[in-house]
Image (spheres, coloured by chain):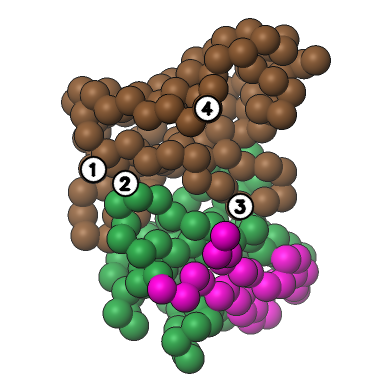
Chain colours: A green, B brown
Amino acid sequence: EPEVTQTPSHQVTQMGQEVILRCVPISNHLYFYWYRQILGQKVEFLVSFYNNEISEKSEIFDDQFSVERPDGSNFTLKIRSTKLEDSAMYFCASTQDRVYGYTFGSGTRLTVV
Amino acid sequence: TQLLEQSPQFLSIQEGENLTVYCNSSSVFSSLQWYRQEPGEGPVLLVTVVTGGEVKKLKRLTFQFGDARKDSSLHITAAQPGDTGLYLCAGANAGNNRKLIWGLGTSLAVNP
């Protein structure tokens, strides 16, 4: 069963530091997403990415966030200057056709101290 | 703003009992997906329903999409301890990006 792989599984960083969360989507998938889940809250959409560009982003995805697909396999989420409220589980997801469901990675637990 | 409300939020039952989890919205979705999430893991897709009135079965799990594509239900027959977990519904919007709108989840505990 193909998997979406996320690294690292845990990241602790100091407030104001930059973090890069990495994802390797399933190889033949075309649509890529980042979601986050703050403890005890709903999963929230951050950004969708298709054809090497952002196709939609949420209000959460401000100028401190960016995404890249630098080499055709990796899909990264960068937070330039982390805030305490960025602490959450960050999930990468990919899909081939957007209709029949998404495959999620196991997530990166980001803790900002 | 599209919202999905799941009920109940918590459910504790005995092995062998039946249960139904509900996912409701005032908005129409192009499809609705059910996921199961274990602690510290990402959501795992169980099923996607696309057509209003659609019913899908996955062993002891039955999923139904409302006729108006605003609501869905998950019914588990003869629950087993292995069914314990967090069940999430997520609606895909009709836009090109099909971003998912999520419910808060139903935490199910099946006691032996």
Circle 1 sits in a helix, a strand or a loop, which is it? loop
Disc 3 packing (10 Å; few <14; some 14–19; many ≥20): many
| Residue A73 image offset from top left, x and y in percent | 50, 83
Q: Nearer the viewer, mark 4 or mark 2?
A: 4
Q: Which residues are magenta?
A: A1-28
Q: Are marks 2 and 3 on the same chain?
A: yes
Quadrant location, the C terminus of chain B: top right
What residue type is disc 1 on?
Ser
Tags 1 and 3 both on a single chain: yes
Say which residue label 1 marks. Answer: B30
**Chain label for disc 3:** B
Q: Is residue A103 visible?
A: yes
CA separation in Å, label 4 and label 2: 24 Å
Q: Position of residue A25 (x, y in %)?
A: 51, 71
Q: CA distance from mark 4 to mark 3?
A: 22 Å
Rendered image quadrant of residue B77: top right
Distance from the alpha carbon under mark 2 to that under mark 3: 18 Å
Q: In the rendered structure, find residue B92 and report the number of the disc placed on it.
A: 2
For the residue pair B78 and A102, the one nearer the viewer reads as B78
**1 or 3: tag closer to the N-terminus:** 1
Residue depth check, mark 1 versus mark 4: number of the one nearer the observer: 4
Tag 3: residue type? Gly
Chain of residue at mark 1: B
Q: Which residue is mark 4?
A: B59
Q: CA distance from mark 1 to mark 3?
A: 23 Å
The residue carrying mark 3 is B42
Number of other residues with Cα within 10 Å of mark 2, as a class: few under 14, some 14 to 19, many 20 or more: many
Q: In the rendered structure, are the residues bearing label 2 and label 1 in contact, judged by CB atoms less than 8 Å apart? A: yes
